[in-house]
Image: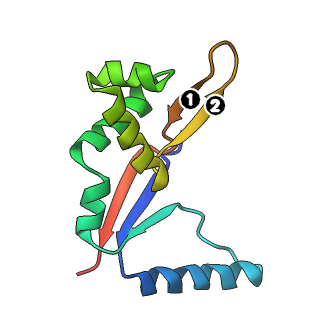
Amino acid sequence: MKTKIIKLSVKSMREALTDFASALGKAGRGEKVDSQREISFESIEGLRNVLTKRRLELLSAVKHQKPQSIYELSKLLNRDLKSVNTDLKVLKENDFIEFKKITEGRQRLIPVVEFDKIDIMVKV
């Protein structure tokens, strides 16, 4: 199975918008556009604020232990449900995690991580 990689970069808003405009132009001309997911941050501090040690542990637990609810995830991590919900919200807002909505029986959200590896690129 092919490893799915999510690429993180630290670059200015201007650089990110330039990259986006370039990809949009290529797509408009029918040229091949790199389909690898990339999430950009304006600073290393911004990246660190989103990907804390606890949130990385949460991503790993979702990926490898496949909890069937947020409640189950909080129990696996031995963490308070409210703090897990807060971390999941931040990860969702930054495209690191998705939710599968289950409506059979009791309605619940199943957290899902769609990538296997995170590559971080920082210009010097």
Left or right: 83 in relation to 71: left
Q: Residue at x 25, y 40 (%)?
A: 54
Q: Earlier in the sequence, mark 1 or mark 2?
A: 2
The residue lying furthest to the front in this view is 82
- For disc 2, the neighbor class at 10 Å (few under 14, some 14 to 19, many from 20) is few
Q: Are marks 1 and 2 in contact (CB under 8 Å)?
A: yes
Q: Residue 66: where, in percent of width, then height?
A: 46, 25
Which residue is nearer to you in this view: 30 or 62? 62
Query: What's the residue type where badge 1 is placed?
Result: Leu
Q: Residue at x 51, y 82 (%)?
A: 17
Left or right: 31 in relation to 122: right
Q: Which residue is mark 2?
A: 101
Query: Could you say which quadrant of the image residue 12 lies in?
Result: bottom left
Residue 60 appears anywhere in the view:
no
The relative height of residue 25 versus residue 45 in the rendered view (above or below) is below
Residue 85 appears anywhere in the view:
yes
Q: Residue at x 38, y 63 (%)?
A: 8
Query: Could you say which quadrant of the image residue 1 lies in?
Result: top right
Q: SS of the residue at dot 1?
A: strand
The relative height of residue 8 versus residue 64 in the rendered view (above or below) is below
Q: SS of the residue at dot 2?
A: strand
- For disc 1, the neighbor class at 10 Å (few under 14, some 14 to 19, many from 20) is some
Q: Which residue is mark 1?
A: 109
Q: Residue 97: where, in percent of width, then height?
A: 48, 44
The relative height of residue 112 versus residue 72 in the rendered view (above or below) is below
Query: What's the residue type where badge 2 is placed?
Result: Lys
Instruction: Tell me how far mark 1 sits from mark 2, CA to CA.
Output: 5 Å
How is colour applied across the structure in the image?
Answer: rainbow
Q: Residue 56: where, in percent of width, then height?
A: 30, 43
